[in-house]
Amino acid sequence: MMQAASQQVSVWSGQWIRQNPLRFAGVIVHLLLRSLFGIFWLAAGINKISKDWLTTDILKEIYLDRLTEMPPDSFAVMYLQEFAIPLYQLVAWVVACGELYAAIGLLLGLTTRWAAGMSLFILINLAIGGYYDASLLPFFLLNILFFTKPSGLWLGLDYFLARRYPQARWFR
């Protein structure tokens, strides 16, 4: 679809826009969704920090409450009992910092695909922990979209860093 950054094709050139009007509309929609998703993760990360997730046992209490709502023989219960609850402090740090990293990456177009990967990792762990419902499907689909398309090269710091460090996987 898109040519590689090394070929110096810009989705912002008038010629490319005239030749690819539907692709250009897709790029605009993609960038808008990426920005909105970044704002979502920023709000989530700030919320966790402001609610003292990193220094209290709030997450542990949330998990313990969740245990009472699930079938005792479910995988989610085992995941919570064997992993998430014993390591709740580490999980809280990974989630909060991961959300902030995903937010910064998506908003600035900085290591965009890696940020989408972190976002996907957080969502998968939410789902495994018993918080899965149909409302997560659009989030999974968006993450796959952000992971597969080089939107940081379209608009973001990845564009400049990929030119400076062409062999670095972080910025592709």
Image (cartoon, grey):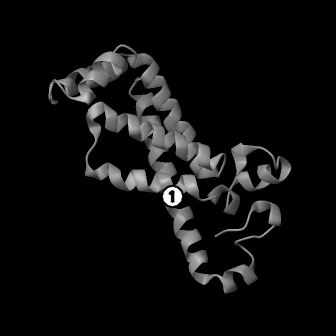
Q: Position of residue 37 (x, y in %)?
A: 47, 52
Q: Nearer the viewer, residue 6 or 37?
A: 6
The residue lying furthest to the top in this view is 86
- Whether residue 127 is visible to the viewer of this picture, yes or no, is yes
99 left or right of 109?
left
The answer to whether residue 52 is above or below residue 20 is: above
90 left or right of 68?
right
Residue occupying image coordinates x 64% and y 50%: 108
Q: Amino acid at mark 1?
A: Leu
Q: Position of residue 87 (x, y in %)?
A: 40, 16
127 left or right of 155?
left
Residue occupying image coordinates x 81% and y 66%: 7
The residue lying furthest to the right in this view is 164
Residue occupying image coordinates x 28% and y 42%: 132
Q: Quadrant of residue 138?
A: bottom left
- Locate the N terminus and report the quarter of the image it occupies: bottom right
Q: Quadrant of residue 89?
A: top left
- Whether residue 54 is visible to the viewer of this picture, yes or no, is no
Helix, strand or loop status at disc 1: helix
Q: Position of residue 168 (x, y in %)?
A: 77, 43
Q: Crowding at label 1, few (<14), some or many (≥20) Cα neighbours within 10 Å?
A: some
Q: What residue sits right under mark 1 in the picture?
A: 145
Q: Position of residue 5 (x, y in %)?
A: 76, 61
Q: Nearer the viewer, residue 149 or 92?
A: 149
The answer to whether residue 3 is above or below residue 156 is: below
Count of marks overlaid on the render: 1
